[in-house]
Image (tube, rainbow, N blue to C red):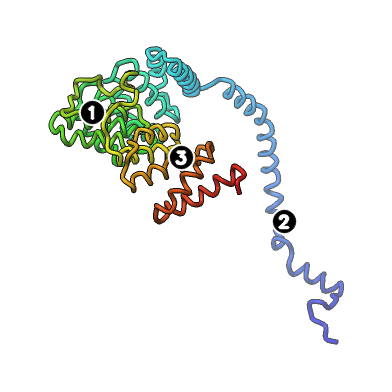
Amino acid sequence: MVQWPILQPKSPSWYYHRRMSHPPLGGRWYLIAAWVPAVWVVIVIVAASAPAYAVAKTAAAAKPSPVAASSRAAVADLGAGFSAYRSGAYTSAARILTGAVGKGLRNEDWVLFLLGESRFYDGDFAAARASFEKVVSGRAGSGRPAQMAPWRVADCLWMEGERARAAQAYAKLVRGAGPWGDAALARFRMTEIVAAKNPVEARRQWLAIAREYPAHPLADEALRRSAAATPAPGSVPVATEAPAPAAAAAPATPIAPQERLKRAETLSRDRHWSEALDELGRLPAELAPELAAERDFQIGETKFHMRRDYGKAAELLLAVAPRLAGDKAATAAFHGARALSRIDRD
């Protein structure tokens, strides 16, 4: 059997000669011996200075720096200012929040935005706009306040009487309006500017607002203005707050059945089901066959999604399904059958 050389046993003399021919560090043990005292000196110095270093570090931690103290005061001002803002004490909120500006807070954008809101509701629109513009400039951050601030800048311009500039700002914002902006209010105010020059175009825009935002507090006012022969922007309060109770009621305004159906569809889609049924109830009893089918379909769908009156929903949906086409016919038949199932009429 062949034995590999590495596995063969070595004689004691082999180990002796190997050690003599390859001594550790080439036999230069004196190098290590020279370093040992120096290493011990370093160890002794570190050990002696460790307690003093620990005491100094503890003292530094116990004594806050001016920057840390200022940051804590700014955080306290932000909390107090927000509480005052929530309680409606806008003058106090503005005064307190002013002390938190420029103190290096990570949420400086919220400080400026809340300061602008407090000044706005306190009636100081110019100062409020200055705060919102600082948020828009980007120096304070790019979070949610930076998305909301441009809308508030336009609101401030409107309240300052700069209606044309405000309308221009709103026109840029409504193209990409998100949940942080009131697009209906912006379009309402823009239409007030248009009404002074082109009443016919303004009437069309009023109607579009009433159709696309039927649940908005200004929807009924827009609908009322759309029926006026010559809309007069100065004849009613400016759209800065909800309409008066008399205007908030459903206006007795002639409106095409197609427009009512679109308004009801929007209301139902946004889960304003009771309002959708009210809107459908204002339709005339006699309608063209296609409009009557759409009305019955929407009433049945609204009742089905409300999870009430399943019997009426099933009756309307199953009856109207043959008069519809495409997806609406399939939806009517399916939801009509499900409505029957939910009242144990399988």
Disc 2 element: helix
Query: What residue is disc 1 on?
Result: 225
Q: Amino acid at mark 1?
A: Arg
**Quadrant location, the N terminus:** bottom right
Q: Which residue occupies the extreme front position in the image?
A: 286
| Comes first in the chain, label 2 or label 3 | 2
Q: Is residue 142 visible?
A: no
Closer to viewer: mark 1 or mark 3 = 3
Distance between the Cα atoms at labels 1 and 3? 28 Å
313 over 137 or under it: above or below: below
Q: Earlier in the sequence, mark 1 or mark 3?
A: 1
Q: x and y percent of residue 72 in the render?
A: 50, 21
Q: Amino acid at mark 2?
A: Trp
Q: Amino acid at mark 3?
A: Thr
Where, by quadrant of the figure, is residue 18 drawn? bottom right
What's the distance in space between the residues labelled 1 and 2, CA to CA?
A: 104 Å
- The residue at 23%/28% (across/down) is 225
Circle 3 Cα neighbour tier, 10 Å, few/some/many (<14 / 14–19 / ≥20): many
Residue marked by disc 2? 29
